[in-house]
């Protein structure tokens, strides 16, 4: 079963705009991670935020975590055509596995 | 590039056959996890190997089995293939180390696309 669910399922924006994706999950977590996947290829690790952190930045990426609402958001600023991909959140609840949502498909129009 | 490699890239099998997929973990990592990703879905955890033993398993039947070797590389074996086994199979490597903390940051390979006809 999916632990995290991303919203929206699909997002289309123009180059230069910001893209925001949201993730909700059901159980308590150790950390939450965001991944990018291009065209059904391998997953690229973007950022990890720990359960005691509220916000984290990496380049053009900003991730927030609200454990009281069991939700996270990924903001990509000044998007580029190369950001076109599927984005997944994955939760780690101290187990062996990461539990993934079904992803947000982002299309950035040049 | 993560340094995690998988082979083969693509594979076509028929129902009932057996398949072996291979993964080499990133340098310095000692743990390998396998995931199945159906089209349009997120990856689903199959199992994890640490110190050559299965270290956790998802909701997959016993015909999905694996191995980890002393160099930390790993194999995923699937017997009696079914049409629903058609998917992208992803391998992820990580470091299990009490000193590093339980953050389970996993690095994925490019995947093997399996098609079952």
Image (spheres, coloured by chain):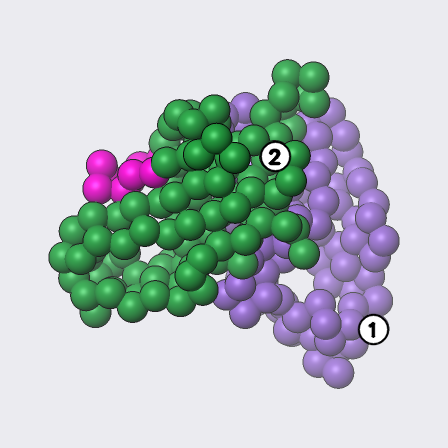
Chain colours: A purple, B green
Which of the image's four quarters has the C terminus of chain B? Answer: bottom left
Residue B64 placement: quadrant: top left
Question: Is label 2 in contact with label 1 (beta carbons under 8 Å)?
Answer: no
Tell me whether marks 2 and 1 sit on the same chain. Answer: no
- Element carrying mark 1: loop
Which of the image's four quarters has the N terminus of chain B? Answer: bottom right
Q: Residues within 10 Å of mark 1 (few under 14, many from 20)?
A: some
Please determine whether, in this image, residue A59 is positioned above or below residue B47.
below
Question: Where does the image place residue B105, in percent across and percent down from the top left?
Answer: 63, 36
Question: Where does the image place residue A80, in percent across and percent down from the top left?
Answer: 78, 72
Gap in Å between the C-alphas at discs 2 and 1? 37 Å
Residue A69 seen in this snapshot: no
Determine the residue positioned at 48% across, 40% down.
B73
Is most of the magenta stretch helix, strand or loop? loop
* Between B105 and B10, the one nearer to me in the picture: B10
Please determine whether, in this image, residue B9 is positioned above or below residue A14.
above
Residue B13 placement: quadrant: bottom left
Q: Which mark is residue A16?
A: 1
Determine the residue positioned at 59% across, 66% down.
A38
Please determine whether, in this image, residue B87 is positioned above or below residue B100.
below
The residue sitting at the top extreme is B98
Residue range (magenta): B58-66
């Amino acid at each position: 079963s999916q632990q995290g669910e991303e919203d929206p399922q699909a997002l289309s924006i123009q180059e230069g705009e910001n893209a925001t994706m949201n993730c909700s999950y059901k159980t308590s977590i150790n950390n939450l991670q965001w991944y990018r996947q291009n065209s059904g290829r391998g997953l690229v690790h973007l950022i990890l935020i720990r359960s005691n952190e509220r916000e984290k930045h990496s380049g053009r990426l900003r991730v927030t975590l609200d454990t009281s609402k069991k939700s996270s958001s990924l903001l990509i600023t000044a998007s580029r055509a190369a950001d076109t991909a599927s984005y997944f959140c994955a939760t780690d609840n101290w187990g062996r596995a990461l539990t993934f949502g079904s992803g947000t498909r982002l299309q950035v129009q040049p | 590039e993560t340094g995690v490699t998988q082979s083969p890239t693509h594979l076509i099998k028929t129902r009932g056959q057996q398949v072996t997929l291979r993964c080499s973990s990133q340098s310095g990592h000692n743990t390998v996890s396998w995931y199945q990703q159906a089209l349009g879905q997120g990856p689903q955890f199959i199992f994890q190997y640490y110190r050559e033993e299965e270290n956790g398993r998802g909701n997959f039947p016993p015909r999905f089995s694996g191995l980890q070797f002393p160099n930390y590389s790993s194999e995923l074996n699937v017997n009696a293939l079914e049409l629903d086994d058609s998917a992208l199979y992803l391998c992820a490597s990580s470091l299990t180390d009490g000193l590093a903390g339980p953050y389970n940051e996993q690095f994925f390979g490019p995947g093997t696309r399996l098609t079952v006809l």
